[in-house]
Amino acid sequence: MTVSPTSSLQRLHLIAVGGSIMHNLALALLKRGAQVTGSDDEIFEPAKSRLQAAGLLPAQEGWFPEKITADLDAVIVGMHARPDNPELLRAQELGLRVYSFPEFIYEASRDKQRVVIGGSHGKTSITSLILHVLRHHGRTFDYAVGAQLEGFDLMVQLTEDAPIIIIEGDEYLSSPIDRRPKFHLYQHHIGVISGISWDHINVFPTEEIYREQFKIFAEMTPKAGTLIYDQDDEQVQLVTVPSHPDVEYIGYGPHEHVIKDGNTFLLNKKDEKVPVQVFGEHNLRNISAAKEVCKQLGIKSKSFYEALATFKGAARRLEKVAEGAGSVVYKDFAHAPSKLKATATAFKKQFPKRRLVACLELHTFSSLNPAFLPQYAHTFDAPDVAVVYFNPQVLEHKRLAPLAPEQVAQAFGRPDLQVFTDSKQLAEFLHQQNWQDANLLMMSSGTFDGLDLKQLAAEVVQ
């Protein structure tokens, strides 16, 4: 049994503990036996209830430098905090060890085989697939993934005895005081690049700068390491040129398949049809990537397909909300141009005879930035009815220039695009649609400002 270099860190304080991944880390550390405290200036559900149930919810929201004392073994700072955070400044003043999330995960897994899944899109789904297969076959592993997965209590697991760790490798910044992309810090043995499509314009102002981060990741693959990549993605091809003779380069494409009556079947080497519960070319590529990783970890094809049959997908990644005789409602995390196009196209291909109403919420800094909007040109052509929603107050909060609905429609290159800036008007529009032989697809990293999707879905499929 290996001993983690962080196992001696028993007293830990998390700054910005309310974050999605940070509160999961807090719970994972508590489960491992550490003494954990935390702070945040805003904590929302489900983090609030989960921290409260574990006895980790701060008594008050806000920052309290007096919580940072010399007897702490380390402080872990989340991306939500600012460089001038009072608790962070106090930790630096005392000379305490300060980790970003990826730094801590690396230190905790230094003696493990590290598998890091990178890419602008698909990384959560690929990570989820791998975890599902490994768990199905009783393998021992640790993980860090950016979504809540069915059958897994936490999004982070850190143990002493797991020989491998599967990490979703986000390209966003590591912390407010560390401007390196997270996936550069994990030091992978097996790396995946699922696709590259310019994102995070606030951090990577040009496509070239963004792509360079993936090139650095690819070149970090060590001797005897493996780099698995989407061989059809033009941007990926630019950064994964096989240049190191001691590295194994494995390209993949969409898994062979057939679609019949709204169901997708994979074709294996024996031309047997393997039913799966996910669909779309992007997911077929995700399956191929996961299969290659699992092969590297000793999972044979037959065992992979056996486990895949029960995989339902990651939360909010093409997640079925409701289904009726002639209609189905899905929600998806898609918001970047490449994700939007892949999801909408896949949905239309899966149900070609049904009318598709698809709605996208512009919610992120990039998606609301007038300089980035042209990236959405013709990415929303697949739906029969295409709808875009954004809240002008979010633009103000992010200190971005105002957007006119006409500006959005022009950027998408679709004159019939329906654009709403009021969630009640959006809901009314959707309620008025004819849902006979029609499907609804809702795509956002937000909530459409509290729109009751379950109630809407029930009306659609009744």
Image (cartoon, rainbow, N blue to C red):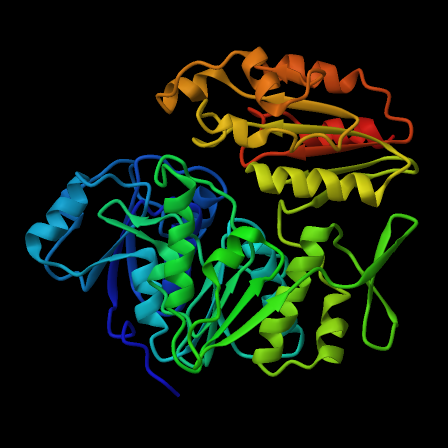
Q: Position of residue 297 (x, y in %)?
A: 57, 80
Residue at x 80%, y 38% (from the top left corner): 348
Give the side of residue 433 with respect to residue 2, left or right.
right
Say if 287 sits above or below 364 in the image.
below
Determine if residue 168 is in view.
no
Q: Position of residue 422 (x, y in %)?
A: 58, 13
> Looking at the picture, does residue 436 appear above or below residue 25?
above
The residue located at (66%, 78%) in the rendering is: 137
Q: Quadrant of residue 7?
A: bottom left
Classify residue 438 as left or right of residue 410.
Answer: right
**Residue at 20% across / 41% down in the picture?**
83
Say above or below: 461 vs 414. below
Q: Which residue sits at x=51%, y=50%?
A: 196
Q: Position of residue 350 (x, y in %)?
A: 82, 45
Quarter of the image where one finds residue 318: top right
Q: Indicate left or right for 101 with 377 as reference.
A: left
- Residue situated in front as seen by the camera: 86 or 316: 316
Is 133 in front, or is 243?
243
> Left of 50 or right of it: where is 101?
left
Q: Residue furthest bottom?
A: 1
